[in-house]
Amino acid sequence: MRILAIETSCDETSCAVVEDGRKVLANVISSQIDLHALTGGVVPEVAAREHVLKMVPVLDECLGAAKCDWADIDAVAVTQGPGLISSLIIGTETANVISYVKNLPLIPVQHISGHIYSNWLERDTEPEFPILILTVSGGHNDLILMKDHFNFETLGETRDDAAGEAFDKVARILGLGYPGGPAISKIAAEGNDKAFKLPEIYLEKGSFDFSFSGLKTAVMYEVKNYIKAHKLKSEEEIPHQFKADLAASFEKTTVETLSEKLKMAAEKFPEIKEIHLAGGVSANRRLREVCTAKIAKMSKPVKFRYPASIPFCTDNAAMVAAAAYYSYKKSPSKFKPKSNIIPTTSFSL
């Protein structure tokens, strides 16, 4: 089954064609990073206008790369939410029109479930249930126990700032630019991660929820105190090594908090067969290395996966197609041609 998928939940315009939920025939992503770097973050109206400009060219490029025409497509999938509503409208309306004109089944996909299914892409074998999943992105952190396809139990979630959002905000505080994740990781490689003692926030005992607002605030005060102590005029005068050390300490603290929560959940649910990372921050090299090391020390061997390539970590349509395939396979009669998908900012797993 070949599914054409569309993803416009934030600032990437993406279309993909995926066969049987795993084989990626094409995955085209048009990024808006350079545009939003001018404002240090995503402006919803700007993102939506860019989706309008890029939607048809990306769609055409995708079909060309997949070497498909419309007769080869069996269904259309689209991210319904959550996300920026103005961006979601562009993707859902495009999918609605395609479904109507081409008489193809239309499959709505929840954004986080898309990230979860990124670990099915380009795999020789399917993951084995039950699976413990840590999704780490700009808008959300979730610890999820996945017992079967679309059988999710949320163990923990973000209470305030998600890890990806904290990376962006700390990068802005340090004057490192946008997006924050790659910028922090790059300069952190030059720093001493023991230079600053930053708070690892685990909340109440036994909680699997996440909170990174306090960590972000601690970084802000370190910068303010340094500026005051050295009588600097602005962040621009802060030495490079100070920024590198603080970035390294921040990255270490964030990774330790995420990986420790994952380890705690794995110990509570010994029946799991696999552990997965997903979401934009799953591209972080240090997070992968620390999780790998902790999982290797577990009493029972557990397979550890993260997306097969970096484009599958960030927002992309291939993950949407993968989730759509397994959703369709579970209940094919549920999805009809000429449906009308309405975008939403609150679309639960």
Image (spheres, rainbow, N blue to C red):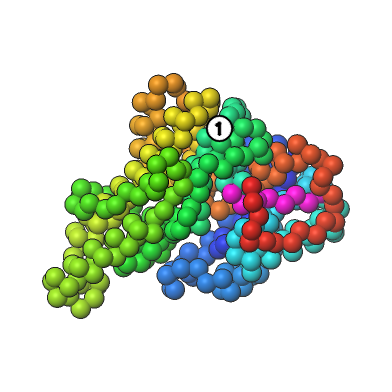
Magenta span covers which residues? 105-112
For the residue pair 128 and 204, the one nearer the viewer reads as 204
Q: Is residue 242 left or right of residue 78?
A: left
Q: Residue furthest top?
A: 300
Q: Residue furthest bottom?
A: 233
Q: Residue at x 47, y 55 (%)?
A: 159
Residue 84 quadrant: bottom right
Q: Residue furthest left?
A: 230
How many marks can you see?
1
Image vertical order of residue 162 relative to residue 48, above or below: above
For the residue pair 289 and 30, the one nearer the viewer reads as 289
Image quadrant occupied by the N terminus = top right
Q: Label 1 amino acid?
A: Ile
Residue 321, position in %: x, y? Answer: 67, 46
Image vertical order of residue 272 relative to residue 84, above or below: above
Q: Residue at x 85, y 52 (%)?
A: 337
Residue 185, position in %: x, y? Answer: 33, 52
Tag 1 residue: 131
For the residue pair 130 and 21, the one nearer the viewer reads as 130
Q: Is residue 108 magenta?
A: yes
Report whether residue 346 is seen: yes
Q: Is residue 187 magenta?
A: no
Residue 147, position in %: x, y? Answer: 62, 32
Q: Residue at x 32, y 63 (%)?
A: 217
Tag 1: Cα neighbours inside 10 Å, few (<14), some, or many (≥20)? many
Secondary structure under tag 1 reads strand
Predominant SS of the magenta segment: strand
Q: Is residue 289 left or right of residue 345?
A: left
Q: Residue at x 46, y 43 (%)?
A: 208
Report whether residue 8 is seen: no
Residue 101, position in %: x, y? Answer: 85, 59
